[in-house]
Amino acid sequence: MGKVHGSLARAGKVRGQTPKVAKQDKKKQPRGRAVVGFGKKRGPNSSEK
């Protein structure tokens, strides 16, 4: 069988080249149940808008 994708000598090349940038802290968005705005929950068979 022939060699497949490059040797392990090159492993981690790109990540090693990229400059280190500190993570910015950002406010977490609410998700799931917390996102739903106002109003009463409606069932799937409800005809009112």
Image: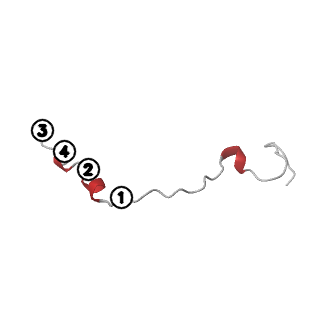
Q: Which residue is mark 1?
A: 20
Alpha carbons under labels 2 and 4: distance apart: 9 Å
Location of the C terminus by quadrant is bottom right
Q: Which residue is mark 3?
A: 1
Q: Residue at x 87, y 51 (%)?
A: 48
Label 3 with label 4: CB-CB less than 8 Å: no
Q: Residue at x 33, y 61 (%)?
A: 19
Alpha carbons under labels 3 and 2: distance apart: 25 Å
Q: Nearer the viewer, mark 3 or mark 4?
A: 4
36 on left or right of 49? left
**Dot 3 crowding, Cα within 10 Å, few <14, some 14–19, many 20+:** few
Alpha carbons under labels 1 and 2: distance apart: 14 Å
Compare residues 21 and 43 and report the one nearer the observer.
Answer: 21
Please, is residue 36 above or below residue 17 in the view?
above
User: Which residue is the extreme one toward the left?
Assistant: 2
46 on left or right of 1? right
Q: Earlier in the sequence, mark 3 or mark 2?
A: 3
Alpha carbons under labels 3 and 4: distance apart: 17 Å
Residue 5: give x, y in percent of width and height.
Answer: 20, 47
Q: Secondary structure at mark 1?
A: loop
Please, is residue 21 above or below residue 3 in the view?
below
Q: Which residue is mark 2?
A: 12
Residue 31: give x, y in percent of width and height.
Answer: 65, 48
Q: Earlier in the sequence, mark 1 or mark 4?
A: 4
Q: Amino acid at mark 4?
A: Leu
Q: Amino acid at mark 3?
A: Met
Q: Which residue is mark 4?
A: 8
Q: Amino acid at mark 2?
A: Gly
Q: Amino acid at mark 1?
A: Lys
Specify whether residue 7 is in view.
no
Q: Nearer the viewer, mark 3 or mark 1?
A: 1
